[in-house]
Image (tube, grey):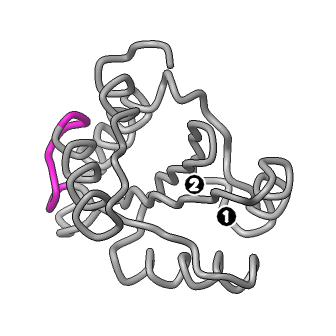
Amino acid sequence: MAGVLFSFYNFSSLIDLNIGISDRLDENRSESFTILFCDFTGISQSIVETNLQSLLRTSDSIVHCEHYYFFVMPYTDKYGCGIVKKMIEDLFERAIPSAAVCYPSNGENPAELLESLHAEAKKSLKVDLDCLYSAANKEPF
């Protein structure tokens, strides 16, 4: 088991790819994939990446911007995302601030999904994810 690491610059394209796969497979589920945001402030990046490699599936994707990590998890709804979040917290033995959005219930394109994630993180965590605007516009961070 190991998530695949992608460049933050390609985050929007990665979301677009997952939307295309979901649409191509004609998934009629309400939540075809989930994007999970986790704030690993205070934990070394090498420790985070080493531990996540043992936790995530090969179909899961990892994108990070400094200490913010974003996971794109195909075939995972909010319930499944909650299980992954608990596994992450158990692995690091601490609460990890997080927020999640699902396709298509929280947005039907990358810009809508990233905006929904930004709004959710701001509302529930008081975290401003302005970095997502560079991802939505495919600008280098």
In the current view of this chain or complex, which residue is farthest to the top? 139
Q: Which residues are magenta?
A: 104-111
Question: Would you say the residues marked 1 and 2 are in contact, meaning their CB atoms lie under 8 Å apart?
Answer: yes
Distance Cα–Cα, label 1 vs label 2: 6 Å
Residue at image position (28%, 70%) is 124
Q: Which mark is residue 60?
A: 2
Q: Which residue sits at x=24%, y=56%?
A: 103
Q: Which mark is residue 37?
A: none
The residue lying at 41 percent from left, 65 percent from top is 75
The amino acid on which the numbered mark 1 sits, given as a three-letter code, is Leu
Crowd rating for badge 1 (residues with CA inside 10 Å; few <14, some 14–19, many 20+): many
Q: Is residue 106 magenta?
A: yes
What secondary structure is the stretch in magenta mostly built from?
Answer: loop
Looking at the picture, tell me which residue is in the foreground, 133 or 126: 126
Asked which secondary structure carries label 1, the reply is loop
Q: Position of residue 39 (x, y in %)?
A: 55, 59
- The residue lying toward the viewer, choosing from 125 and 81, is 125
**Residue plotted at (27% across, 49% down):** 118
Residue 48, percent from left and from top: 76, 57
Q: Quadrant of residue 132?
A: top left
Q: Quadrant of residue 131?
A: top left
User: Around disc 2, counting alpha carbons within 10 Å, would you say few (fewer than 14), some (14 to 19), or many (20 or more)?
Assistant: many
* Depicted 134 relative to depicted 103: above or below: above
Quadrant in which residue 12 is drawn: top left
Q: Is residue 14 above or below residue 39?
A: above
Element at label 2: loop
Q: Which residue is mark 1?
A: 56
